[in-house]
Image: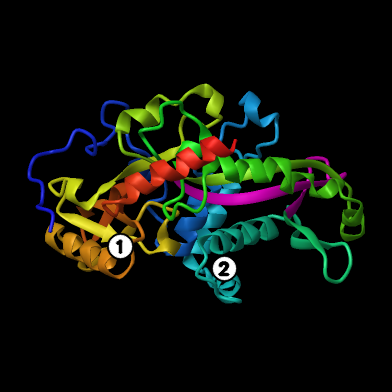
Amino acid sequence: MPTLQTEPSPELNSRTDAAGPSYQSQFHQRWEGLRDPHVRALAWLLEAPDLLDAHAARWIGRIATLGPLSDMDVTWLHTLDRNPRALYALINAQPSARLGRYAEKLLTFYLRETGRLIAHNVQVRNGPNDTIGEFDFLVHDERHTGAVHWEFATKFYLLESHQAQMQADAFVGPNLADSLGAKMDKIMQQQLKLAEHPAAAQYLSQPVTQAQALVKGWLFYRDAVAAMSLPPGLGIAAGHCHGFWCELSALDLSLARHYLVLPRLEWLAPARAPVASALSADQLHESVSHSFAETLAPVMIAVCDRHGDVVLERQRGFIVPDDWREKAAQRVQHAVVKY
């Protein structure tokens, strides 16, 4: 069993004191009055920094952004927090353990309540047994003269840090089945072209005037410096949400006295939980070790500070199995050879 570190790790002690308040601390301050976990997740989804830079040349103007929330939106969220029954009704309809599906329901609720939604999850078929694709969201354009097609994604990628030439495929999913490069290639080259297919017209009540990708999420780095020094050509937003990743043996458990293991459906907003549900360093080590004994899937944790009777996330990271880094490097190399 790996021994617990007692000396601070320069790689993982990524509290952004030198660069100003962390995203988590800003979120907790901004949404201090929100208590319902689904409403907090919705607030994160609506106001979190975009994962991709809408102005980067790479995306040729095809990245959507929600923009800043209005005062009316903020008031609406606080009102919803006091009575979230309508939101729960949508979330509990056809329950799913998929994080992407959960995030879709949150966005659907907001767009529906604000009158921006035309339709969502519209399948396009070219015959009874030939599905061409699906419009994630169709929303009103600014002038209400047509529809904007949004492909929506919430993604979590880890930078495989030994990649000599930085590229989007060096960001891989925790389960190694996906990469930022592959995901965006599919969105840009296939999904955003759906409205151009001859079979799409019969499913559209309004012409599609624009097709864009709306991408939220978190990126994770082994070296905290890497998050601040990405090549502009990657098209990643400078202020994106980010955390760390490491093996369990490398985790600095002197970072805090309180930790949380975050289930998949709690990966969106910075965590807030009762003190009683938090884990000590020893308990966290035991929990992650037990998880790896059952499945070699990376574990998302939150490093927390206590505030009265709750703990608030200070930073977050993926704890990966000992062989994950080697497998990630192979995954990236295969992508390089393929393209």
Q: Quadrant of the N terminus?
A: bottom left
Q: Amino acid at mark 1?
A: Ala
Q: Marks 2 and 1: in contact by CB < 8 Å?
A: no
> Looking at the picture, how far across and down is residue 229, in whole percent?
40, 24
Rendered-image quadrant of the C terminus: top right
Q: Magenta segment: does it hold 193?
A: no
Residue at 49% in and 60% down: 39
Q: Which mark is residue 87?
A: 2
Numbered range of the magenta stretch: 137-157
Judged from the image, the secondary structure of the residue bearing numbered disc 1 is: strand
Q: Which secondary structure type mostly characterizes the magenta part of the structure? A: strand
In the image, residue 151 lies in the stretch drawn in magenta = yes
Q: Secondary structure at mark 2?
A: helix
Task: Tell me if residue 315 can be seen.
Answer: yes
Q: Which residue is mark 1?
A: 273
Q: CA distance from mark 1 to mark 2?
A: 20 Å
